[in-house]
Image: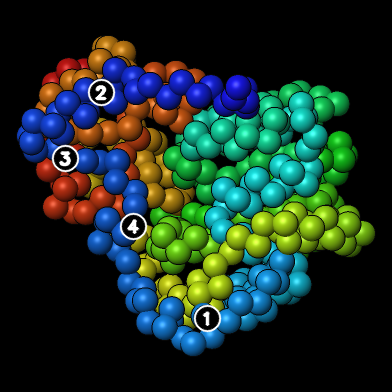
Amino acid sequence: MFSHRLPWDAAPNAYTRAVSAHRATGRRLFDLTESNPTRAGLVHATLDPLLDPAALQYDPEPWGLAAAREAISAYYDHAVPPERILLTASTSEAYAHLLQLLCDPGDEILTPRPSYPLFEFLAGLQNVRAVQYPLHYHEGWWLDLDSVEERITPRTRAIAVVSPNNPTGHYLANVPALTELCARHSLALICDEVFRDFALEAAPGPSTAHGSTPCLTFTLSGLSKVCGLPQMKLGWIVLNGPSAAVQDAASRLEMIADTYLSVSAPVQSATAHWLAARHSYIEAARSRAAAHLAVMRASGLAPLRAEAGWYACLRLPATRGEEEWMSLLLDHEVLAQPGYFYDFDSEPWAVVSLITKPEIFQPGWERLRACALRNA
């Protein structure tokens, strides 16, 4: 009686069960996976803006309240007009809106690998197929346009990129060539920029939100990362590209957004205040990530190059499989994310959060390092 959109069997795997069993014993666990800013001691925002009486006023505006969209325009240094910004309850909902806009059941979008394991679920819920294209590493991560183009079929409707990618931490370098590729094949480009502000060793490239793009382009971001407020549930889509295509997409997106009207009025009312106060939080998160990354690089067990973001990707010695490595680290009271969580093509990998509290990161990293070197 249920749909077949997703594989609904969500039984935990052996590693998840082992972590749960470890926690149940009450033993110490140095969690190097923590990426929730509200639990990492990084939140600088206050709830005061929610007390504004204007938050009690309901205005069913499909695009979102003008004041919130103007604040997001200011976030882009006013290079994006408010009328090209559509508010959503999250970037996940933004993806859902765009899949509904662009795809019929059975259509395809191209998504990066490795990357955060969300695309297949979001696409599956819309009866859309996510087709992965590979990211390559050689002194830095890069996208091979030939690998992307060879995966385009008559059912392809969009190419999704994440800049900087999660967890690889690289900015999208070849934006003009990618937008030309999309234009040539009449595809939309969806660019997720939620980690764009957290540069570690490279200045951010130009955002796809502004400037001229030859293809219909949708740029996503939100308060979850930009302000460290995942619980406040506000994201946005910036429309860019040829004016006729933007106008057509805008009218259709308005119909989708008007159907749901999902964005919270109090959060919209508070958006200008939170965005204006974001800089101290961003610098605190960026500085912590950079400091942790420096510790890792000086330890003799260096992760791969990361230009930005909150994560470090560590290639473990090939003396054992990834599951075995994760179990061994758990025996040493360390929790890390396995590479298969992000669809790495090879193994073994460990992905470590760089915004973990220092008092957890320092001893956890030392244990991980000692275990890896001892068992190399």
For disc 2, the marked residue is 17
The reply to whether discs 2 and 3 touch (Cβ–Cβ < 8 Å) is no
Gap in angstroms between the C-alphas marked 4 and 2: 25 Å
Disc 1 versus disc 2: nearer the observer:
1
Seen at 70% across and 31% down, the residue is 128
Disc 2 versus disc 3: nearer the observer:
2
Q: First in sequence: mark 2 or mark 3? A: 2
For disc 4, the marked residue is 37
- Residue 281 lies left or right of residue 67; in this view the side is left
Of residue 247 and residue 126, the one placed in the foreground of this image is 126
For disc 1, the marked residue is 56
- Residue 86 lies left or right of residue 164; in this view the side is right
Of residue 144 and residue 349, the one placed in the foreground of this image is 349
Gap in angstroms between the C-alphas marked 3 and 4: 17 Å
Which quadrant is home to the N terminus? top right
Seen at 19% across and 46% down, the residue is 361
For disc 3, the marked residue is 30
Q: Against 46, is 245 above or below? A: above
For label 3, the SS is: strand
Q: x and y percent of residue 375 in the render?
A: 17, 17
Seen at 29% across and 41% down, the residue is 33
Q: How many marks?
A: 4
Q: First in sequence: mark 1 or mark 2? A: 2
Local packing at callout 1 (Cα closer than 10 Å; few below 14, some 14-19, many 20+) is few
Check disc 4 and give the amino acid type: Pro
